[in-house]
Image (cartoon, rainbow, N blue to C red):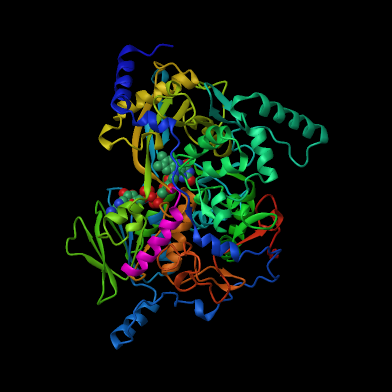
Amino acid sequence: MAMPPRLQDRAVLALLRIYGTSTRCLQARHASPRLPMRQVSSLVARSAGFTRTAAFPAGVEEGQSSPASHGGSRRSYASSTSPAKQQQQQQQQQPPREIAVLGGGLTGLTTAYYLNKFVPSAKVTVYEASDRLGGWVDSQRFAAEGRGGSEVKGIFERGPRAVPALGQTNRYDDLVLYELVQDLGLQTEMFNIPRGEEGLPNQYIYYPDHLENVKLKMPTKNDSLATWVGAAVNILHAALTRPIFKGAPTAFVNFVLGYGKRSPAGQASGAVADESIGDWLLRRTGRREPVDNMVGAMMHGIYGGDVWKLSVFQSPMQSMWLKDNLRGRGKLVFEKDLDLFQDLYYNGDAEYKKMVRNSMNFGLIGFNDGFGTLTDAITRRLKTDSKVKFKLGEPVTDISYNEPTGRIKIKTSKSKTGVAYDKVISTILAKDLYAITNNKLPSLRNEQATSIMLVNLFYPKRDLIRPHRGFGYLVPSSVAYDLNPEGALGVIFDSDHQDFMRGANNADEVRGTKLTVMLGGHHWDWLPRDRWPSRDEAVLMGRAVVARHLGIPPDEPLAAAGAKLCWQCIPQQHVGHTTRMQGARGELERAFRGGLAVAGPSYTPPGVLPSLRAGRDAAMAAAGKGYRTHKGTSRMTHVGETGLGQFRAGGEGEGEGEEADDGSSDGERVLRSEVLPFRHGYARGLYPEDE
Ligand SMILES: Cc1cc2nc3c(=O)[nH]c(=O)nc-3n(C[C@H](O)[C@H](O)[C@H](O)COP(=O)(O)OP(=O)(O)OC[C@H]3O[C@@H](n4cnc5c(N)ncnc54)[C@H](O)[C@@H]3O)c2cc1C
């Protein structure tokens, strides 16, 4: 399977330009960088307050609220009580009338949508640096000539394509998506692939030199004893014989037996210290191979990031890690998630409740015409209200606090004198915000984001990836350099997704083999922007990857191809993120007096669902509203005026992180799976069913 010489030369040239002049890449691949552990003092405080709770008191009553929780959540930072200051304080008790949202991506649009919903009288202006809305959500249609001259049509997703439903987790962010879908009338546009099929049905890791299916068939509780025994034998055999599972059996046993449960740093200080996902798992399992091979590959899929640098506290393993340090059996759940559930579910109508109930069986969720369906629908809705304005192609260049008026002034590329707002919510990257705030937010200076080169390939010929079929595959850093010189993070089998979608909703796309190759991520963090491959070079590199890993001939005719450099697209929450966010929270309070808030994946986990949740939360807090729960209306203490309320330092009890009078807080509890409503297969749970 030789690559045609001309193509080969160009692909090699691109590689040489990237790697040849620097030894840094090779060094980075062989040394596992370590950052020092830092103490996360907030966890100490939170751990100390931890208790095991069986259930809430029965009797959820809708609409109860504490008087203190309405409208008056904004904290006054004025020390003087002069009449002018008093007037300013009174103004601050009112919901803001003029609000700016920085960034027109998914988080910014969601924030603007909910601001418009929660404070309909407010004027909302969305500033977007580029000339299009949607940010990384980018569904692009293509039409090309296929085999025999027939027309080939389809969609290249150049950003998110499908999100995993949260039915098997302890979170409820997906309920925000269902609310938006209902509000915007997108019920028939949304599709879901039922749970169990979302693996489609296989998930692969390329290791050490071939694709290994890591989705082992698990029996269900309805299966017979013989099926269980057969499955156990198969799993054991796979675990003991397949290279990808090397070290996994020992790691599993160690983990279950509680090996290395308390960190040395934690034991010494009596505190809980942040650490990387890799360091935590190595400590708890005693084996490095499963971390490098399996978990490392998984982190490439989620963050394009380095398992030895990403903070475990901010990762999908957060609740497991926290539980190491807490007592109690069951699932660790955050109060804010249970409160979100109550707010949305109990205030939803019958149709909404049905959607939430059905979501228990969702595996993957997406939209027939791509995720752009959602951002387009939000934009269309916002454009119907003259109080919402969009400023496209107008990057914000400066943000400052105006002491006499208590307002936030922003300057843009087109407005040098500036415009003042009562409230500004920034959804742009943390380090970009640092750059436009005159060194007022130094804790954000070193927040990192990684870049990905996304290559979309559409071959008119079907079944090019057989015998493999499934979600796609990920490539860990432990794969030898000469088997992955392009720095591929993984390949998504889009056409297999499409087949499953087609079954569900007859999506109209000509069949073929559609693949997305993800290149770069942390492998190329050191590479200056002007040395990244061009579009054509990236397509060649993508083809070289699928030739080597999947055996697709490099000269196999393509009907359509594209590449997009997603520069600094995935924020990396490295070890110490929590401490830096605690710092940023204080800096925002001091420099902007609650007038500037932040939201989005620089602060909370990356992904579509967390972005939707962050946007809704930010708008709700800015509006002075809260989740309506059986305890009353929550004060959104996990958001607060800065958006960073959840990052309060240990011992801090005042201000926005304060425990609300009504008892709502962002604490956590350990609960049995079966009491979590609509999670882990249980429909009836903590709260009485009201239907
Ligand atoms: C290739 C790729 C694939 C992904 N796949 C998935 C997936 O399958 N599932 C999933 O859940 N998530 C996925 N994600 C993550 C998800 O897309 C993001 O978390 C989400 O879109 C982030 O939205 P955002 O609005 O916070 O940020 P962005 O989309 O980055 O939006 C920020 C906006 O701010 C603008 N801006 C920047 N600076 C300024 C300024 N100074 N003034 C004004 N505007 C400014 C930018 O132009 C941008 O439009 C993927 C991301 C990428 C890049």
- Which residue range is magenta in the image? 573-592
Q: Which is more toward the observer, 111 or 181?
A: 111
Q: Which is more toward the observer, 275 or 71?
A: 275
Task: Name the quadrant of the C terminus.
Answer: bottom right
Magenta region, main secondary structure: helix
Residue found 61% across the figure and 38% down from its top: 286
Residue found 53% across the figure and 25% down from its top: 207
The furthest residue to the front:
268
Q: Position of residue 60 (x, y in %)?
A: 66, 70
What number of labels is visible? 0
Residue 392 visible in the picture: yes
Q: Which is more toward the observer, 105 or 205?
A: 205
Q: Is residue 564 above or below residue 608?
A: above
Q: Position of residue 374 (x, y in %)?
A: 44, 50
Residue found 32% across the figure and 58% down from its top: 442
Q: Position of residue 189 (x, y in %)?
A: 50, 46
Asked if residue 575 is among those painted magenta in the image, a careful observer would answer yes
Left or right of residue 203, residue 475 in this image = left
Quadrant of the rendered structure where residue 252 is? top right
Q: Is residue 263 above or below residue 230?
A: below
The furthest residue to the bottom:
83
Asked if residue 263 is among those painted magenta in the image, a careful observer would answer no
The furthest residue to the left:
416
Quadrant of the rendered structure where residue 540 is? top left
Residue found 35% across the figure and 81% down from its top: 89
